[in-house]
Image (spheres, rainbow, N blue to C red):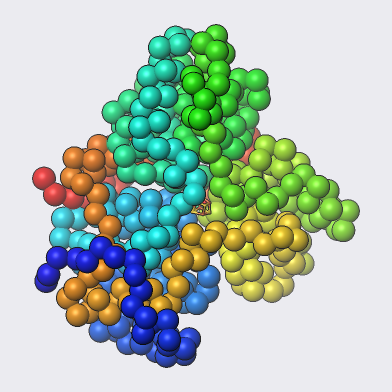
Amino acid sequence: MTQPRHTDDLPVEYGLLDSGELQRRIADRKRQLGRDLCLLAHHYQNDSVVQFADFVGDSLKLSQQAAATDAKFIVFCGVHFMAESADILSGPGQRVVLPNLRAGCAMADMADPDDVAAALDEVRSAGGGRVVPITYVNSTAAAKALTARAGGACCTSSNVANVFRWALSPEGGAADKIFAIPDQHLGLNTAIALGYCADDGVLYDPAQGRGGLTNEALARAKFILWKGHCHVHQVFTPADVAAARAADPGVFVIVHPECPRAVVAAADAAGSTEQIIAAVAAGKPGSRWAIGTESNLVARLARRHADRKVSLLSHSPALCWQMARIDLPHLLWSLDALATGEPVNVVTVPDDLAREARVALQRMIDIRPAEAASPEQARGTTKITKHTKSTKQKGK
Ligand code: 13P
Ligand code: SF4
C-alpha cells in the first residue's frame, strides 16, 4: 500500500453522482472491504450516513469501539478530534480515516494547545493549591497530551461527573481545583450537579491576560472554566423551556449539559447523548419529550419512538455544520481510496503526542459512564466504577 494522500479536495466526479448511485456504490465497497472495515458514526450524523454505520455512538462509545475493533481500517464519520482519539486508541496496524478532513469541531478549536499550556502556568502561579485539568474529549490531541502531563484526565459528557469526582478525590487527581477545558457550560453544569454553586467557578478567557481574572479570584476558585462552547447547544434558551411547558404541562424537558446553565436549570434533567437516548427509550408509550440537543438525533428518536411525542426543544434547528461535512460523496471517495490501496484523509497523531494523550484518554475510559439520565444523575449521584477492559497500545 502506498502512503496516504492528505487532501480534502473531493474529486469532482463524486459530486456529480446522485444519491441512489452513491448509496449503491458505498454498499458495494462495504461488502468488498468486509471485515477490514469498521465504519463508526456519531449520533449527530444524518441518516444518509448513519445507515452505513457498523456502530453508532457518542464520543465515549465510539472511542471504546475504536479501541476494541480489529479492523484494518476505521472510517470515522464524526469530527477530527474523534478520529484523533480513534487513532490514539487503535492498534499499530490500523488506520483511521476521516472522510472529510475539514470536519473539525469549533469548540475543540477554541482551546489552542499553546494557550492551554500558558493558562495552566498562570493558574498554578496564582496559588490556591493543586490544579488538575479535566479536558473534554472535544479537544485536540495536543490539549489531551498537556492534560496528561499536568496529572489530569479527559472526560465525555457521559462520564464527566465521575471524572470530576476522581479529580477531587485524594486517591484520584488530588485536586484542590479543577481546570475544565474547553466547555465552560459542561464544566459549570457538572460542578453544580456535584453540589457546588456558581460562585465556586470563574470563567477563564484565553483572549485576556491571566484569563481576565485576578490572582485572588483564580486562587479562590474551585472550578476554572475555559471560555469555550458548542454553538449547536447555544440555540436553546430558558424561554424555549417555558414555551414547551406552556404548550404541554406534562412534557419532560431533557437537555445536553453543553447547554447554558440557565437552560439546564430550567429543564427536568440533563444528560449526555447516550443518556438522553436511554431516557427516551425507558419512557412510557404516550410520554412527551422536549429535547435540547442536536437535531438529527432528536429527529431519529422521534421516528424510533413513534408511540411517544418527541420534539426538539427549540423552533430553530440545532445542527453541527462540521459533522455535516461528512456526506455520501466524501464517504464513497474514502472507501474507494481504501479499496484501491491509496487511502485518503488518514488521521495520524504523532507517536510522542499519542503516547501522552492516551494516558488522559485511558483514565477516562477506566471510569464507567452513567447508564441513563435522571434528576439523580444530574445531581451527581452516579458511582465511579472501574472499567475492566484495557485498550490496545499503538506502536512503540
Ligand atoms: P457526546 O458525544 O459526548 O454526547 O458529545 C456531544 C458532542 O458535542 C459531540 O461532538
Ligand atoms: Fe463540536 Fe458542537 Fe459539533 Fe460536537 S456538536 S462537533 S462539540 S461543534
* Quarter of the image where the N terminus is located: bottom left
**Is any part of residue 36 visible from this angle?**
no
Residue drawn at 43 percent across, 55 percent down:
104
**Is residue 116 shown left or right of residue 206?**
left
Quadrant housing the C terminus: top left
Q: Is residue 96 left or right of residue 119?
A: left
Q: Percent x, y for residue 133?
A: 41, 28
Q: Residue at x 66, y 25 (%)?
A: 198
Vertical arrangement, residue 320 with respect to residue 18, above or below? above
- Location of residue 94 (image quadrant): bottom left
Decide which of 224, 68 is in the foreground and name it.
Answer: 224
Q: Position of residue 228 (x, y in %)?
A: 53, 38
The residue nearer to you, when weighing 336 against 34, is 336
The residue located at (27%, 72%) in the rendering is 37
The front one of 391 and 145 is 145
Q: Across the whole image, how many numbered discs are drawn on residues?
A: 0
| Quarter holding residue 276 | bottom right
